[in-house]
Image: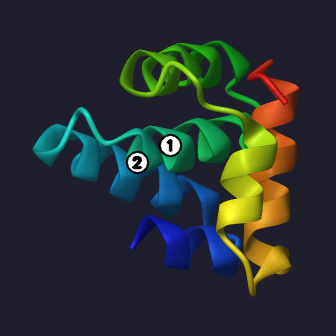
Amino acid sequence: MAIAYHASGDLPAAAEAAAKAIQANPRFSFLHVLYASALSRLDRVSDAREAAARILECEADFTISRFVRSHTGRADIWEPIGDALRLIGLPE
């Protein structure tokens, strides 16, 4: 659901859906990516940076470029997520 909410621009719902999914699977970095991106795009920078730290705890070698490149076909969804992650200082 978090991806669908991201795609539709409903960022509060995207953040909420990602947070709920994280409760069920806290070691899945993808969920933290969606959460951090939504928070970043909502200008909740401090919270987004905390979520970004969780990404790196789950996946120490995470990079934005590899993440975006691995999700092909819908640049309109994945590029804004990558851009939001850049704003909070995740490695390129």
Give the image location of residue 28, x and y in percent.
Answer: 31, 42
Specify how the rendered protein is coloured: rainbow
Label 1: which secondary element = helix
| Image position of 92 with respect to 67: above or below | above
For the C terminus, the quadrant is top right
Label 2 neighbourhood size at 10 Å, few (<14), some (14-19), many (20+)? many
Q: Dots 1 and 2: beta carbons under 8 Å?
A: yes
Between 15 and 49, the one lying in front of the other is: 49
The answer to which quarter of the image holds residue 42 is top right
Give the image location of residue 15, x and y in percent.
Answer: 48, 49
Q: Is residue 15 left or right of residue 26?
A: right
> Callout 2, which amino acid?
Leu
The answer to which quarter of the image holds residue 79 is bottom right
Between 19 and 78, the one lying in front of the other is: 78
Give the image location of residue 29, x and y in percent.
Answer: 41, 39
| Image position of 90 with respect to 39: above or below | above
Give the image location of residue 20, x and y in percent.
Answer: 24, 49
Label 2: which secondary element = helix
Residue that label 2 marks: 31
Residue that label 1 marks: 35
Quick one: which residue is furthest to the left in this view?
A: 24
Distance from Cα at disc 1 to Cα at disc 2: 6 Å
> Callout 1, which amino acid?
Tyr
Q: Nearer the viewer, mark 1 or mark 2?
A: 2
Q: Residue at x 83, y 76 (%)?
A: 75
Q: Residue at x 50, y 18 (%)?
A: 60
Between 57 and 3, the one lying in front of the other is: 57
Quick one: which residue is furthest to the bottom in this view?
A: 73
Q: Is residue 48 left or right of residue 89?
A: left
Q: Residue at x 47, y 61 (%)?
A: 13
